[in-house]
Image: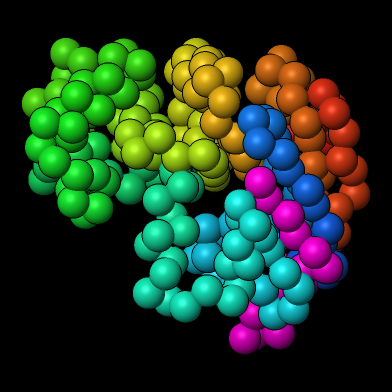
Amino acid sequence: MILMKDVYKTYANGVTALNGINVDIKQGEFVYIVGPSGAGKSTFIRLMYREVRPTKGSIYINDVNVNEIKEKRVPLLRRDIGVVFQDFKLLPKLTVYENIAFALEVIEQPPSLIRKRVMDVLELVGLKNKARFIPDELSGGEQQRVSIARAIVNHPKIVIADEPTGNLDPDTSWGIMKILEEINDRGTTVIMATHSKEIVNTFKNRVIAIEDGLIARDEHRGDYGYEN
């Protein structure tokens, strides 16, 4: 599903974010990416959906080397990858329904299919009654649920969540985690970068710890392992 071989990333300012990463993530896994601030977690996440490219090494998504594909092929790669951001990245002037539908409109899905899929994912995240609201009319937790719905509406094989509970209160965070767990139970691979010790230690999954650009730990059903 996701394979990284000897991956390095050095930015133009000379900072080396990753210093020889080797990772193998199977279909259907739920993986936490943890580690101190500045350890390389965000770079690790961004490499998977080709937001950045490695300086050296290979990254395979579904047997495709993402470092070698042409720029015009990147949107095709991302059809299999849903991304959930800490700051939601919703379009402020569009309704909840329109924000989610947009992800299907850009790949030219028929209107009848768009409506069905949008309403299905709104039901999954518990927001079917807020389809006509705009983002400013929603709480932070509701906006994050819209972001998740948008990420999964195209039935991606992989969902990448970058600090999805970072701006949310604890009770709301539990609700977001239950949605991500349910998505994973349906067979989607979930990769989640997080600083939440409570979440990692409560919802037990594989833990990959990154420190100084290297993998320090890779544990099945691991603990967070850091003091917040």
Asked if 64 appears above or below 126 in the picture, the reply is below
Q: Residue 166 location in percent, x, y?
A: 53, 36
| Quadrant where the image shows the C terminus | top right
Q: Is residue 43 visible?
A: no
| Residue in view at x 36 percent, y 27 percent | 145
| Residue in view at x 35 percent, y 18 percent | 125
* 40 inside magenta stretch: no
Q: Residue 192 location in percent, x, y?
A: 61, 38
Residue 164 is left or right of residue 16, and the answer is left
Residue nearer the viewer, 69 or 83:
69
Asked if 203 appears above or below 12 in the picture, the reply is above
| Residue in view at x 19 percent, y 39 percent | 101
* 10 inside magenta stretch: yes
Asked if 50 appears above or below 146 in the picture, the reply is below
**Picture quadrant where residue 28 is located:** top right
Q: Is residue 26 visible?
A: yes
Asked if 14 appears above or below 92 in the picture, the reply is below
Read off the magenta span: 1-17
Q: Residue 61 location in percent, x, y?
A: 61, 55
**Picture quadrant where residue 152 is located:** top left
